[in-house]
């Protein structure tokens, strides 16, 4: 199958806790080294491309591209842009409509959209990058838990309406600040079975995600076709021990079930030898 891609990651901030990132005594070099190690693990989980939507990953991307580090193709956003006391996330109908009117081509999150706004995305050809998020931990404040619950609760409607109106969907994990969670990057794909078949889920995390990356146009750092296995495409290939169309659970255990991992024609894992 083609290499998988994750359309909403923060590689730098997924490799360390929030306390570690905010620690004034922590050196950038040490945090970057941890992020580079996480990038390697991401590739070895079968993710040959990643859309990093915020964080200082240009150095890691450059090292990977030059062959000095091992990791996925990174499409970097760089620094986050935010209004005072907020983030660029877009969840509500008002926020999403304002973004669409401003010419935004991809909405991140959107789990609190109403059906009318979802139809607007379809009519305008705007992408929706969705995630299947978990409830906030018990240690979080009551306000944080309540906000997160609203988002998690809205996920079902968001996927159902996106499917109903044929919205251009992308998929990502948005795991960050809890390094131990990153091992769940693959198992998050299994949650998609609540709204789609195994074949549809696999197409989403390979072919469909790649179409969003292609919107980079002339600024695409990796020109070429991703998300497919065909002559002339970029050679990102996974060999699975079994048929993931029949058993999507195979994808959740990459250490055991991904026998070969190839990126750009180079083999980074080979259990057949």
Image: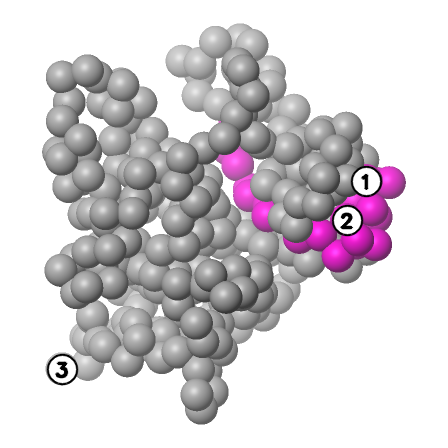
> In which quadrant of the rendered image does the N terminus lie?
bottom left
The residue wearing badge 2 is 121
The residue wearing badge 1 is 117
Q: Is residue 124 above or below residue 16?
A: below
> In which quadrant of the rendered image does the C terminus lie?
bottom left
Q: Secondary structure at mark 2?
A: helix
Asked if residue 11 shows in the view, the reply is: yes
Label 2 with label 1: CB-CB less than 8 Å? yes
Q: Secondary structure at mark 1?
A: helix
Residue found at x 45% / y 63%: 220
Q: Is residue 142 above or below residue 147?
A: above
Please rate how many residues cluster around mark 2, counting C-alpha atoms within 10 Å: few if below 14, some from 14 to 19, many from 20.
many
Q: Tell me: 86 left or right of 49.
A: right
Residue 234 place in picture, x, y as percent? 39, 78
Q: Nearer the viewer, mark 3 or mark 1?
A: 1
The residue wearing badge 3 is 273
Residue 38 place in picture, x, y as percent? 24, 46
Residue found at x 17% / y 31%: 28
Please rate how many residues cluster around mark 3, counting C-alpha atoms within 10 Å: few if below 14, some from 14 to 19, many from 20.
few
Magenta includes 136?
Answer: no
Q: Tell me: 90 left or right of 247.
A: right
Asked if residue 112 shows in the view, the reply is: no
Residue 73 place in picture, x, y as percent? 34, 61
- What is the CA distance from the residue labelled 2 to the residue labelled 1? 7 Å
- Quarter-of-image position of residue 103: top right
Q: Secondary structure at mark 3?
A: loop
Residue found at x 55% / y 43%: 131
Magenta stretch in the rendered image = 115-135
Please rate how many residues cluster around mark 1, counting C-alpha atoms within 10 Å: few if below 14, some from 14 to 19, many from 20.
some
Q: Earlier in the sequence, mark 3 or mark 2?
A: 2
Residue 260 place in picture, x, y as percent? 27, 75
């Amino acid at each position: 199958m083609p290499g998988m891609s994750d359309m909403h990651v923060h590689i730098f901030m997924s490799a360390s806790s929030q306390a570690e990132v905010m620690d004034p005594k922590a050196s950038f070099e040490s945090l970057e080294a941890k992020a580079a190690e996480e990038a390697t693990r991401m590739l070895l989980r079968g993710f040959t491309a990643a859309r990093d939507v915020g964080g200082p990953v240009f150095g890691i991307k450059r090292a990977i591209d030059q062959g000095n580090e091992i990791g996925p193709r990174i499409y970097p956003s760089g620094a986050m842009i935010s209004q005072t006391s907020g983030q660029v996330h877009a969840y509500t109908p008002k926020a999403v409509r304002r973004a669409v009117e401003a010419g935004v081509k991809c909405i991140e999150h959107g789990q609190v959209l109403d059906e009318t706004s979802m139809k607007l995305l379809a009519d305008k050809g705007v992408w929706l990058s969705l995630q299947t998020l978990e409830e906030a931990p018990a240690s979080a404040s009551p306000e944080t838990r309540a906000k997160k619950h609203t988002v998690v609760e809205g996920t079902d409607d968001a996927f159902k309406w996106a499917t109903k109106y044929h919205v251009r969907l992308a998929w990502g994990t948005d795991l960050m600040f809890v390094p131990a969670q990153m091992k769940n990057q693959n198992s998050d794909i299994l949650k998609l079975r609540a709204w789609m078949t195994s074949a549809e889920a696999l197409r989403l995390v390979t072919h469909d995600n790649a179409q969003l990356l292609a919107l980079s146009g002339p600024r695409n750092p990796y020109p070429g076709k991703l998300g497919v296995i065909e002559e002339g495409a970029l050679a990102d290939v996974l060999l699975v021990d079994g048929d993931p169309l029949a058993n999507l659970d195979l994808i959740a255990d990459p250490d055991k079930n991904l026998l070969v991992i190839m990126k750009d024609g180079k083999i980074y894992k080979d259990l057949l030898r």
